[in-house]
Image (cartoon, coloured by chain):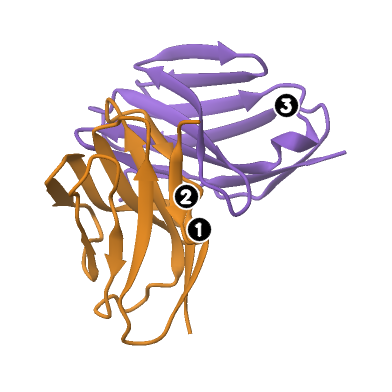
Chain colours: A orange, B purple
Amino acid sequence: DGGITQSPKYLFRKEGQNVTLSCEQNLNHDAMYWYRQDPGQGLRLIYYSQIVNDFQKGDIAEGYSVSREKKESFPLTVTSAQKNPTAFYLCASSIDQSEQFFGPGTRLTVL
Amino acid sequence: QKEVEQDPGPLSVPEGAIVSLNCTYSNSAFQYFMWYRQYSRKGPELLMYTYSSGNKEDGRFTAQVDKSSKYISLFIRDSQPSDSATYLCATYNDYKLSFGAGTTVTVRA
């Protein structure tokens, strides 16, 4: 059963804490993306990776970090430098970059 | 100026009505246009994908692109309560998608 999985579904973070969101895909897609969704603002690109061991900053990369050690996996770390991390985080993958498929999302809340 | 502008609504229609959703975009170089549907607390799913100008139909859904006015539209015919969701328009250029804010649609039974 092919698809994109994200975990956890809900995540709570204390002030000053780093947290890592997981994204895994078994679609054999080369490209993977991380977006942040806030109410009334649509989706904004955080980081993207077009190939293993390579990734680029998107529009709002400050306070976030990623790695791409395996084709299937693209974890996102929300660091303590991200001042307003409460949001819905979406991971996507694509085979031709224009047609992106999304995971179910992780809702992060800062306590 | 945002690359893609979309009226956030909300939009409420009776079952069976035609739903009309619209977006405008700023960059005339955009060639690929998408509509995503997002149910509450779920990830977006690709609904329609069009290249350049023209119409594309898929069942009850029709996507239109007018590149001369930089206007993209989605029409839902014979709307059903199951169509209640947020609809996001998007354009693709270079490496990334640019999204509108999304329009929340409620179809009343």
Q: CA distance from mark 3 to mark 2?
A: 21 Å
- Quarter of the view holding residue A66: bottom left
Q: Residue furthest left?
A: A54
Q: Chain of mark 3?
A: B
Say if mark 2 contacts mark 1, CB within 8 Å. yes
The quarter holding residue A77 reads bottom left
Residue under label 2? B101
Q: Residue at x 53, y 34 (%)?
A: B22
Give coordinates of residue B20: x percent, y percent.
Answer: 63, 30
Residue under pointer 3: B18
Q: What residue appears at the point 62 percent right and 45 percent down from the top-left corner?
A: B39
Label 3 SS: loop
Pointers 3 and 2 within a single chain: yes
Q: Which mark is residue B55?
A: none
As rendered, which of B43 and B51 lies closer to the eye? B43
Q: Nearer the viewer, residue B74 or A88?
A: A88
Residue that carries the numbered disc 1 in the rendered image: A40
